[in-house]
Image (cartoon, coloured by chain):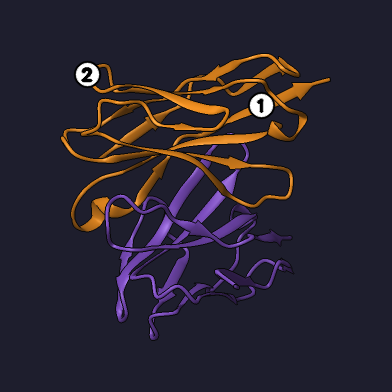
Amino acid sequence: AQTVTQSQPEMSVQEAETVTLSCTYDTSESNYYLFWYKQPPSRQMILVIRQEAYKQQNATENRFSVNFQKAAKSFSLKISDSQLGDTAMYFCAFRGPGGSNYKLTFGKGTLLTVNP
Amino acid sequence: NAGVTQTPKFRVLKTGQSMTLLCAQDMNHEYMYWYRQDPGMGLRLIHYSVGEGTTAKGEVPDGYNVSRLKKQNFLLGLESAAPSQTSVYFCASSYVRLNTEAFFGQGTRLTVV
């Protein structure tokens, strides 16, 4: 079974600065997808970014980028130019191939607070 | 553009009562999921379905039952609610394709007293 670990329960950053959230995972699969979801106080789950394991190039979405290290099974999220609206719980998630592995497995989350 | 809709949004139950949470999606997704979210625990999978008429157990299935009689609906039942089932419940759906993300409902906050 796949596991996802987020080792930072809480983090804080000053507005306009850069912050990196860590995620590691464990799997024996060679092809899979990784996701970062954001959950603001509204409770809605919002997809931030995704990465395919076969792609060496790190995914980027505006101010959000990832550092994907397949051999190390690491998938960190970098938020540049942090904004107050980035304050949220961030979840790392894994989705594997085939049958029951298609389900999303989540880490325990990192609560990010952006301070003015 | 409804996406994934959960009803109800809030509910308070007494210990031993039963209830059903309804999830409906209008995106023709094959996969549907029920998660529970507890502080410090992230989202844990309760049950999931890979298609109409099929269901499977997730990580924390005890005390819950599910049914998927129609492709667009996924029901989560609590037969005899316990205080340990106090949580926020999320329904999600996705396509079969590996590269597609799951879309989530807005959550149901359930309190069992």
Q: Amino acid at mark 2?
A: Ala
Numbered badge on residue A71? 2
Indicate whether A20 appears above or below B14.
above
Which residue is more in the foreground, A17 or A44?
A17
Q: The chain drawn purple is chain what?
A: B
Indicate whether B2 appears above or below B96.
below
Residue B11 left/right relative to A7: right
- Residue B54, located in which quarter of the rendered image? bottom left
- Residue B108, located in which quarter of the rendered image? bottom right
Query: Image point 37% across, 50% down: which residue?
Result: B59
Which residue is more in the foreground, B32 or A79?
A79
| Mark 1 closeness class: few <14, some 14–19, many ≥20 residues within 10 Å | many
Whole-angstrom CA distance, mark 1 to mark 2, is 27 Å
Sequence-first disc among 1 and 2: 2
Q: Amino acid at mark 1?
A: Leu
Indicate whether B13 appears above or below B59.
below
Residue pushed farthest bottom?
A: B69
Chain bearing tag 2 is A
Which residue lies under the disc numbered 1?
A112
Look at the image and tell me whether residue B61 can be seen. Answer: no
SS state under label 1: strand
Q: Position of residue B103 (x, y in %)?
A: 49, 58
Q: Colour of chain A?
A: orange
Residue A55 left/right relative to A9: left
